[in-house]
Image (tube, coloured by chain):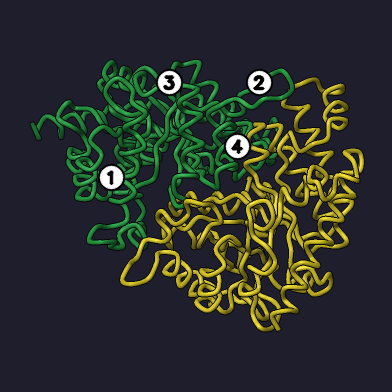
Chain colours: A yellow, B green
Amino acid sequence: MINKLIEKIKKTHAPIVVGLDPMLNYVPEYIQKKAFAEYGETLEGAAEAIWQFNKAIVDATYDLIPAVKPQVAMYEQFGLEGMKAFKKTVDYCHEKDLVVIGDVKRGDIGSTSEAYAVGHLGKVQVGNNSFSGFDEDFATVNPYLGSDGIKPFIKVCKEENKGLFILVKTSNPSSGEFQDRMIDGRPLYEWVGERVSEWGKEHMGDSYSYIGAVVGATYPEQGKVLRKVMPKTFILVPGYGAQGGRGKDLVHFFNEDGLGAIINSSRGIIAAYKQEAYSGFGAENFADASRQAVLDMVADIDGALTAAK
Amino acid sequence: MINKLIEKIKKTHAPIVVGLDPMLNYVPEYIQKKAFAEYGETLEGAAEAIWQFNKAIVDATYDLIPAVKPQVAMYEQFGLEGMKAFKKTVDYCHEKDLVVIGDVKRGDIGSTSEAYAVGHLGKVQVGNNSFSGFDEDFATVNPYLGSDGIKPFIKVCKEENKGLFILVKTSNPSSGEFQDRMIDGRPLYEWVGERVSEWGKEHMGDSYSYIGAVVGATYPEQGKVLRKVMPKTFILVPGYGAQGGRGKDLVHFFNEDGLGAIINSSRGIIAAYKQEAYSGFGAENFADASRQAVLDMVADIDGALTAAK
């Protein structure tokens, strides 16, 4: 799957991923109204609204991008109905041949991580049949529990040709609270990065490992170091746009081959029509605003990468 | 909710929680067959089987125990149908007046943690209505992202009278890989424990905080230290039984008031009928075997606590 991701990045010239993290207040009122007219102001109505919102954005952007990253929390908040919308979104993105990164940040003790891995990336056995639960292509994983929380995910990735992005240095303001603590002269996130690189070495695609890392755009200096600690690791970089990251902050996340990183933007793309820069589109053309925001983001990153050469 | 948990522990004299973590191979064949006859060897069939299994165990044990801890991964592995069985289990346990600890180990950046908190512990707003998604009483949370991944959970707990158990030192063999690394002379888990204690101080029930911690039974020495680092923190202790922990390892997780800890057993209770000690019950009386295993576990812990006095 890492090979497919890289191939699609090369084809689209867009090392980006659109974060499908729909808050209900991102969804234009006319879509909410339509969904509520059909299903009432219920969890079902909310799920229908976010699904229609997602679908329109995917339809308007899928030819420009290699991948999407639905954040499962935004669906889980609507309970079972939300999870149905999550599944529908994953399946629809597959129909559009997009790589789907499930932003699930799971991680537990061995047997439990295996169940998560099976549910999100693999197949579960029921009698003589086997079934995919949610069937993403990649999943994000939390490393706090160490190797035996990670290895069951790696095992399933190997069997199913899928991949991981393991949290190394997260984009949020307080990520340093534990991740930056110094251990034998180096911050925790470097130790985690080193382990990710080791796990990755034995699990290689053609040029990069399918065991990737998450490093926030909001920490460019740390990204620079981690790029060197993990040379063959693909880095998923959240925090662009709404969280503060900009194209020029991102150049050091890439290798000299122009690859090695994929930049996520969520709100900045899916709620673009709410920003002043795209307000001309109007709420009814929100998906066109998202398309324009994708084009602008690609140009921003491409410009920064060109300037850095 | 921490007050209710403590009250129920006092009433049952059982500082234990039954982990409802049903693997399909724990479910007796006759239950599987019945479910598959009705729904086929499908995800729906598997979900029906684990739900019937859970229900029988809850029916056989609810009067002896204060709480249950369904591990959501075991349901997520069966996709949407599994999540329906999770929800049904949570709701049924509430009917039986059990405290439900959702073992979800969620944790993300601020806005995303808020969505998880809303989905598992709080209510989500849809138009003029609000709805509970999964409605557990407590949730387990991963601290790797620092304060801003935790605080949205705390906010929802405060509003909704719910609680958390934050991972401090986990029960798995490799938990030391990052958690034991020394920072300024103390292991990472102690620093995390200290933060949990601080977060907890401002969020107190009558005698303990509703911001609890997870510390594995498999690490009794560390538990002893953490008990002192977090005097007012309730500790959820997994790893008893199948993972290797025994009553005598657990005494230091408790305070002198006999409270402060709740010990989880999953496999050891729900798959008791598969152990030699309970094989006399037979598969058809699996729930009675679980009841006996609860009684034996309570006696084991009670004996250890009495001996330590």
Amino acid type at circle 2 is Ser
Residue B217, which numbered label? Answer: 1
- The residue at which mark 4 appears reads as B115
**Residue A298 placement, left or right of B179:** right
State the image quarter where residue B34 is shown.
top right
Tell which tag, 3 or 2, sits nearer the viewer. Answer: 2
Q: Position of residue B258 (x, y in %)?
A: 18, 27
Which chain is home to disc 3? B
**Do discs 3 and 2 share a chain?**
yes
What is the crowding at mark 1: few (fewer than 14 residues within 10 Å), some, or many (at least 20)?
many
Rendered residue at 78%/46% (across/down): A275
Residue A119, which numbered label? Answer: none
* Local secondary structure at mark 1: loop
Q: Position of residue B245 (x, y in %)?
A: 26, 45
Q: In the depicted view, which residue is nearer to us: A181 or B58?
A: A181
* Local secondary structure at mark 2: strand
Tag count: 4
